[in-house]
Amino acid sequence: MGLTRREFLTRYLPAILGLAFVGGLIGSEVYWDLKKPSNEIIYEENATETVTITVTKTYTSNTTVTETVTQTETVTENMTVTGTSTQTTTTTTQTSQSLEDILFGGSDIQFIPLEVTNVQIGTNNAYLTVYDYLTNTELQIKLPIQYVSNGNINIGNILSAVNNYNQNNQNSGNRPYRLYLILGRAGLSQAVLQNGKWVLPAPQIYYNILISDRGWQDVYNALLNLLNGNATVVMPTSYQGPYSNSLWAWIDGIGSVVTVYQSGQQVNSVEDYINLADYISETPNNPNPSSQGILHVDTIANVQQVGVYSSGGNQYPVYGVNDYYGTYIVLIPGKGNPLVSNL
């Protein structure tokens, strides 16, 4: 005997929905999107229908007799069946360690310099390969593109420029430059591992992006002294100052100053950083890249005022460098929370 519509839906609807769900997964492409919205499927019936059932009976003996019976049945149904099909394209990997545990191990430090070794730029996100020298760990990190870019400069352009600059100047005797993501510890407990990449909770992370020819421990030490108030940010130019080993510079809150470095080697290093910043921003022979507002050349040092320089009726403080913690190129991104706000 045939089935009524109610019997058909009750018996076969779960199987139909299951096949639709599996088919949706097979046809989907797993990519960078976190989750596609679920689609709710609603079946509704409120109708009266007439069903005609024909039954054919065949008897076999010496004589074949065929009997056909036609039965008409009227069925009135008032039924709503709701099923939900959800298609998910995100793979979340469970791990016993948080990103904070992986990066910081058992240390109590509050930030970590991570060397950026590879960058891929997507439409909305940047995908970074970073190396943590503290725990000797390589990781994949996903960040919104606005957090690692400004105008037409993004972290991918910067890494390519640094690598090319190192290649073109490998015989100069200088140490190669490295690109660092300085990642703060606060907020990392909210990071999620998806498709092998750590997705950082953008509103909660604190970070800086900078270039240095120094190792991660020197970078950490410089920023730690800056955060502790033992160092100052001086923004140098390539203009020579009036004294030996001196350059004109700018200090926020003070203005134009003359900075006297400890040696000519330090002065040469500062000028090399300015040249690299010009190379990245494609502004050759710009003596003060920091004035562009995207890439800052910052000397981090403990300084002390040692005099005043008078010129053209103006007086300028003269600062001598006591402890030199290096010069750095810092990207000022379009969005984000800086770990060190005065860089």
Image: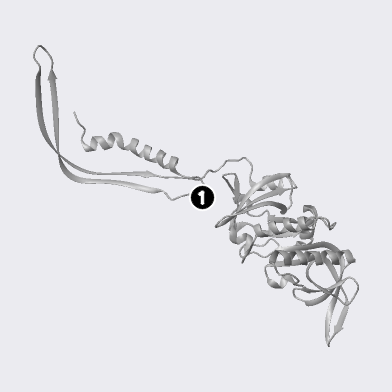
In the figure, 79 relative to 250: above or below?
above
Picture coordinates of residue 29, whole percent (x, y) = 48, 45
In the figure, 64 relative to 204: above or below?
above
**Residue type marked 1:** Leu
**How many numbered discs, if any?**
1
Q: Is residue 299 visible?
A: yes
Q: Which residue is mark 1?
A: 34
**SS label for mark 1:** loop
Picture coordinates of residue 118, whole percent (x, y) = 67, 51
Left or right placement of residue 7 versus residue 140 in this view: left
Picture coordinates of residue 55, whole percent (x, y) = 14, 27
The crowding category of the residue bearing disc 1, from other C-alpha atoms within 10 Å (few below 14, some 14 to 19, many at least 20), is some
Residue 174 sits in which quadrant? bottom right
Q: Is residue 342 visible?
A: no
In this view of the protein, which residue sits in the foreground, 314 or 27?
27
Q: State the scheme by which the image is colored.
A: one colour
Left or right placement of residue 306 versus residue 52 in this view: right
Task: Locate the C terminus by quadrant.
Answer: bottom right
In the figure, 43 relative to 267: above or below?
above
